Amino acid sequence: MGFQEVKQQEQANMMHTYGRFPAALVKGKGVRAWDTEGKEYLDFASGIGVNSLGWCDAGWVKAVSEQAGTLQHISNLYYSPVQTQLAESLCQASGMSKVFFGNSGAEANECAIKLARKWGMAQSPRKNRVVTLVNSFHGRTVTTLAATGQEEFHQWFFPFTEGFDYVPANDLMAAEKAVTEDTCAVFVELVQGEGGMFLLEDDYVKGLRELCTRKNVLLMVDEVQTGVGRTGKFYSYQHFGIQPDVVTSAKGLGGGLPIGACLCSEALADVLNGGMHGSTFGGNPVVCAGALEVLRRVNDPAFLQKVEENGVYFREKLAAIPGVENVRGLGLMNGADVSPSLGKTAGDVANACLAEGLLILTAHGALRFLPPLVITKEEIDEGLEKLKAALQKQ
């Protein structure tokens, strides 16, 4: 099928919930993809941080294919060796004690919120409020939209789930005031991805950990986008020298298949028990096989060091491009602003990049770059040359 036929099918048969770029991708390998018309693209997006090993990595394809040819699904009524192996690997990589598997970041965050409220209300019937940050993003279910600290998301779908309080990022005094005897958890992203690629400050993160410990409140970290090597550590909280009580993970964990994970400390291991939570597809054997291959490759000191080094290289090269301002990020999770002097929006630039054969993302008016973790410096240079050409286009 050609692009126009695909576009017509989509418009005729699918809800119009996505602002799509004008390309239909049909094939990928490594950091490159091709569309229905045969055009090649370099990938600085990785399916919004999902294809951590790139497109159709040979080891990942082998792991997924072998599992699909052996056993594709059993539900959680039975034990699954590939699921338990993944749980063990994740707990070891994160320093956490137990994990629940779902299908997405939103599901992982729903689990975290339920866990926090169950834990809090066992101490007091009123200890059920969750503090999140202004400009945060935690998902698109009714509850995770309510947890999201952006007013634009709090429209249309009333009534939203109650019990969330929002405070400015990097303002410890505001957090101190917001955390009361009714608070069960503080829930944060250490890099606000959907909010525009803004980092939390080191002293602030350490201060939140101390505040939560002192006030007997859970510190929960949303690692849906930042996790699984994206920032140059397996989880981004490892940059800050803290240990959260709850961590949520998704996106890059599956390497291209849908998975979500909610991890908790030993103290919370038995908060959610029989019948309190579940997921038909959570921890599916095929998805877990892919995730195990991702962990085997990513959770390696040399691999993570390369991500960190390439991230520094990416930011240095990006900052040298005329028309790019306020470069920021960790590892291979980076953002920048378009200079107002160009008279272009981030969306304009993203579309111009597509025409140049480069896939990039936007976030809250910023350019967002989430290339596969296996990208090389030469491929970074190639992609940034395409970005430069896109910025110079009239």
Image: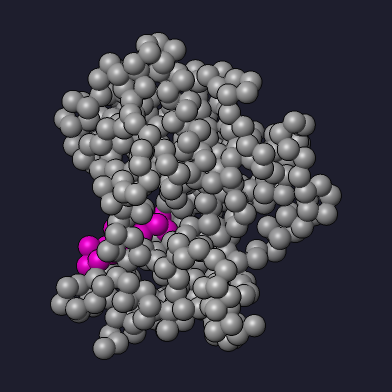
Q: Quadrant of residue 210?
A: top left
Q: Residue 334: within the magenta?
A: yes
Q: Residue at x 40, y 32 (%)?
A: 220
**Residue that protrudes farthest toward the bottom in the picture:** 394
- Quarter holding residue 377: bottom left
Give the side of residue 168 with respect to residue 278, left or right: left
Q: Is residue 285 above or below residue 41?
A: above
Q: Residue at x 58, y 45 (%)?
A: 103
Residue drawn at x 42%, y 41% is 142
Residue 389 rendering spot, x and y as whole percentages: 34, 84
Which residues are drawn in magenta? Answer: 324-337
Q: Position of residue 137 (x, y in %)?
A: 36, 47
Residue 264 vs residue 154: left or right? right
Task: Identify which residue, 86 or 276, lies in the foreground.
Answer: 276
**x and y percent of residue 28 in the render?**
61, 72
| Count of numbered circles in the view | 0
Residue drawn at x 34%, y 31% is 162
Reply yes or no: does residue 124 show up in magenta: no
Q: Nearer the viewer, residue 384 or 12?
A: 12
What main secondary structure does the magenta stretch of the protein show? strand
Q: Is residue 33 visible?
A: no
The quadrant in which residue 24 appears is bottom right
**Colour pattern of the rendering:** one colour
> Is residue 369 among the parts visible in the rendering?
yes
Quadrant in the picture for the C terminus: bottom left
In the depicted view, which residue is nearer to us: 378 or 7?
Answer: 7
Residue 145 to residue 131: above or below: below
In the drawing, does residue 346 fall left or right of residue 90?
left
Left or right of 23? Residue 148 is: left
User: Dividing the image into 4 quarters, which one contains the N terminus?
Assistant: bottom right
Return the residue found at the far right: 70
